[in-house]
Amino acid sequence: MKKIIILCITIMLCMPICGCSSEADTSSAEVPNPLVEWDDIAQAEEAMGVDCKVPTQLPQGYSLESVATIDNRILQVIYEQDGDTLTYRTGLISENETEISGDYNEYDTETDIELDEILVTLRGEQKEGEEKWYSGFWNEGEMRYAFFAQRPLDTQEVENLLAGLE
C-alpha cells in the first residue's frame, strides 16, 4: 500500500515537469497604449491634426496637470486643484461614440442648457438646494466636447468654463 501511495505522489510531482516545453513562447500580443502624454496642448493638436478649443476660464484654483491624446483622436486635458481633477476632452465626432467624458456614473439630475446656440447636456445632482454638475457633453460643428469633474461644479462655473473655450 505504501508503495502505491509513493508511486502516486511521484507521478503527481512529475506531471508538471513533463508538461513543460523547452521552447519559450515568444508570441506575446501586446496592445499598444492608446493614451499618449504631451508637453503641451499645441503638440497634442499637431499629433491629432486638428485645432481644438480648450478652456481659458477655469474654476478658481484649478491649474493644468497633464495633456494627452487618446488614439490620436481625442484631446484630453486634466486640470487639478487640491487633488480634485477636472478632465476636459474634445475630438472629431465619431459614429461609434455618443459621449466622450469618461464619466459612466448615474446621476439624479440630467438637463440640457443652451449656451451660444449650442445644446449642452449636464449631469449631476441637487446639493443643498442647488444643482451641481459632474459632467457635461455637447457637439459643435464636426467636434465633440465633454468635461468630467471630481468635485461638482455649480452652474456659473460650468457657464464660465464653456464661455471661455478658445
Image (spheres, helix red, strand yellow):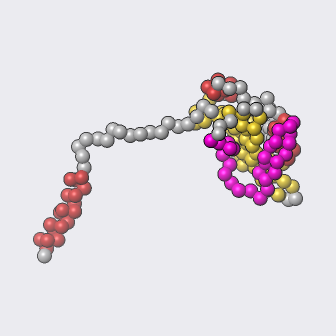
Give the extent of the magenta segment. 96-123
Query: Magenta includes 55?
Result: no
Q: Quadrant of the N terminus?
A: bottom left
Percent of width and height locating residue 146: 73, 41
Residue 108 or residue 44, whichever sits in front: 108
Q: Is residue 123 visible?
A: yes
* Residue 28 position by quadrant: top left
Q: Is residue 79 visible?
A: no
Residue 115 or residue 153, whichever sits in front: 115
The single residue placed furthest to the front in the displayed view is 95
- The structure residue drawn at horizontal position 24% and vertical position 46%, both measured from the top left corner, is 21
* Residue 128 position by quadrant: bottom right
- The structure residue drawn at horizontal position 22% and vertical position 62%, both measured from the top left corner, is 12
Residue 141 in the figure: left or right of residue 48: right
Percent of width and height locating residue 151: 75, 49
Q: How many marks?
A: 0
- The structure residue drawn at horizontal position 80% and vertical position 32%, both measured from the top left corner, is 165
Residue 148 in the figure: left or right of residue 154: left
Residue 65 in the figure: left or right of residue 164: left
Percent of width and height locating residue 156: 87, 44
Query: Magenta includes 110?
Result: yes
Q: Quadrant of the C terminus?
A: top right
Q: Is residue 152 above or below residue 142?
A: below
Residue 29 or residue 63, whichever sits in front: 29
The single residue placed furthest to the bottom in the displayed view is 1
* Residue 73 position by quadrant: top right
